[in-house]
Image (cartoon, helix red, strand yellow):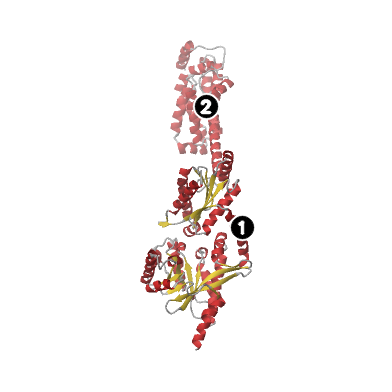
Amino acid sequence: MSNDHHTFAQQDEQRHVIENSGSIAIAGNAEMILQMNMIQLTEEDLSLISAFRPVIISRIEQITSSFYESILRVDKIKEIITKHTTVERLRLTLSNHVIEMFSGKIDEAFIQKRLKIALVHQKIGLPPKWYMGAFQNLQSTLLRIAHDMQNELPHYDRFIQAITKLLSFEQQLVLEAYEEKTREVEQKAKEIVEYQAHHDELTGLPNRRMFQKVLREAIARNEKKQTKFAVLMLDIDRFKLINDSLGHTYGDQFLQEVSKRLLACSEGYQASVARMGGDEFTLICEECPNKGAMARLAESLVAAIEVPYHLKQNDFYVSASVGVAVYPDHGTNEEELLQKADQAMYEVKKNGKNGYRFFSSELDEHLHTKIELEADLRKAIQRQELVLYYQPQIQAGSNKMIGVEALARWNHPVKGILSPGVFIPIAEETGMIYEIGTWTLREACRQMREWHLAGGPLIPVSVNLSSQQFHQPDLIDYIREILEETGLEPKYLELEITESMMIDAKVSKSILQELDEFGVKISLDDFGTGYSSLSYLKQFPIHKLKIDRSFIADITKNVNDQAIVATIISMAKNLKMDVIAEGIETKDQIEFLTRNSCEEIQGYYFSRPLSAPQVEAAFFIPQRKEKNK
């Protein structure tokens, strides 16, 4: 105690005490200076505090222990502290700071250091109420030490007030740090919520809400400048097939890759890209000054989407349909521009997909017709307006009918007989394709069984299977139920599928093997028009290849078509498969096919698609007469 008294006596002689306690004036944080002035922490207080520093140094372990001792008694708080750091490290940091507190100097560096220590405590999860309680313990310890030395302390009462003010200021710094951090967290949370509200979670692209905001702003800018800009609507062709066959995880990966490609394409055009939902994306291009630039952007988007996607250790091919609307030519508000771009996009889909188209006034009429047809189509099955036509499949040379392909027609009450090309795309878009496909399959099986019972030739009926039908989980039960209901034997049903349905080889192989074991025949339709893979033919139980009419049309004069068709026929024969050519219209085409050993033919040269009574009249009745002779 005498050593402490001696130290105080020396410093008291050296200390210059300011009798008038004016406000502190230090360079640094203005808000902190204001707080110091509010609690009347003066230079005299700092001078008195500085004189007590040697005692602080000599008692520092006792002082810092008092800060942590009480909170470490609470198991939950102790767990928080010890989980992130050691108590010894915290004590050392606090010891250094307390000693610095009693240096009598408060500047910007001191304040920032205090704030940093408080943030460390906050980061490890020490709640403010426990922090403030620890400060009270610290203050009690300091006041107790001062009380024990009151006879040796000059200006004891002023010193007690000074310590109280200093610790009050310290607590304010801590609370300020906590509040600032809380504000930062709240602001960050607010920004995250704001971002999520305007961006697509999967791709990170602006969402529909953000796109509409950007579009409104673009309209306002270009209306003022009297300039044009483009709105592009893009839809991925065959995305549903990927999603259904590979699963949503790979579907999500695919969409993320698509978004990256669209962003890469848009860089040179400074276009805004957004995901509207599903596989539908939109772009706003204000840096497209003319139709040529708009067309080049659309072309680059289509080309980028065509590049294969490597998913599940396989390459997958898709395409894009892009519709373009121009402000102000095609619309002056958001709704008009999006509607017109959407119309143009669906026109691309209707005409083979994989391309782009600008909106035109003619599309308005097409849209109106499409809406009317969609409404009518929903009632077509109920009203029994759908009918099946059958196109004979002929054996070359003998002209004997060896099968028929069932083709749906719609006997519209006003428009008359409509071909599948008119209403099947609408059915696919609206989800009615499953119902129509089911009716087609059931009716084809019923009719063929009826012909068999009536003494007609025991030939199979070929039915196109939609992707929705093919990928339903109970396909075999679905087929079995229809065959049992109609009485047709499985061997007289031939299902035509396309290459696109087999995009997931593992799933497709299992389905096709079950169908094969059940006795149903499988025909691969439109072979060679898609992204053909010979592995399909090797892995899957496919019984017949169908050469697409696109190769047949110019077969008599196009050497490339001749080579392709000859190769397909030869390959099928070597793989022990049947092969049939469709779209035959001339004798020259037949002669080429027969020279190359294609024995099964289908096309207008022999017969157009016929109604059931017409088939009976043209083929079955003459055959019966021939037998009866």
Q: Position of residue 101 (x, y in %)?
A: 49, 22
Q: What residue type is labelled 1?
A: His
Q: Is residue 197 visible?
A: no
Tag of residue 368? 1
Q: Residue at 48% of width from left, 14% of height from top? A: 8
Q: In this view, does 459 lie above or below 234?
A: below
Q: Where is residue 592 in the image (x, y as percent from the top left)?
A: 39, 71
Q: In this view, does 316 lie to the left or right of 426?
A: left
- SS at circle 1: helix
Q: Position of residue 226 (x, y in %)?
A: 57, 40
Which residue of the protein is positioned furthest toward the top in this rendering? 13
Question: Considering depth in this image, is 43 or 431 the residue closer to the camera?
Answer: 431
Q: In this view, does 94 lie above or below 328?
A: above
Tag of residue 53? none
- SS at circle 2: helix
Labels 1 and 2: the sequence-earlier one: 2
Q: Position of residue 208 (x, y in %)?
A: 56, 47
Mark 1 and mark 2 in contact? Answer it, CB < 8 Å: no
Q: In this view, does 207 lie to the left or right of 304?
A: right
Question: Which marked residue is nearer to the observer: mark 1 or mark 2?
Answer: 1
Tag of residue 138? 2
Q: Residue at 45% of width from left, 78% of height from top? A: 399
Q: What residue type is labelled 2?
A: Leu
Q: Is residue 440 left or right of residue 536?
A: right
Question: Considering depth in this image, is 575 or 176 the residue closer to the camera?
Answer: 575
Q: Distance between the residues labelled 1 and 2?
A: 81 Å
Q: Residue at 46% of width from left, 26% of height from top? A: 95
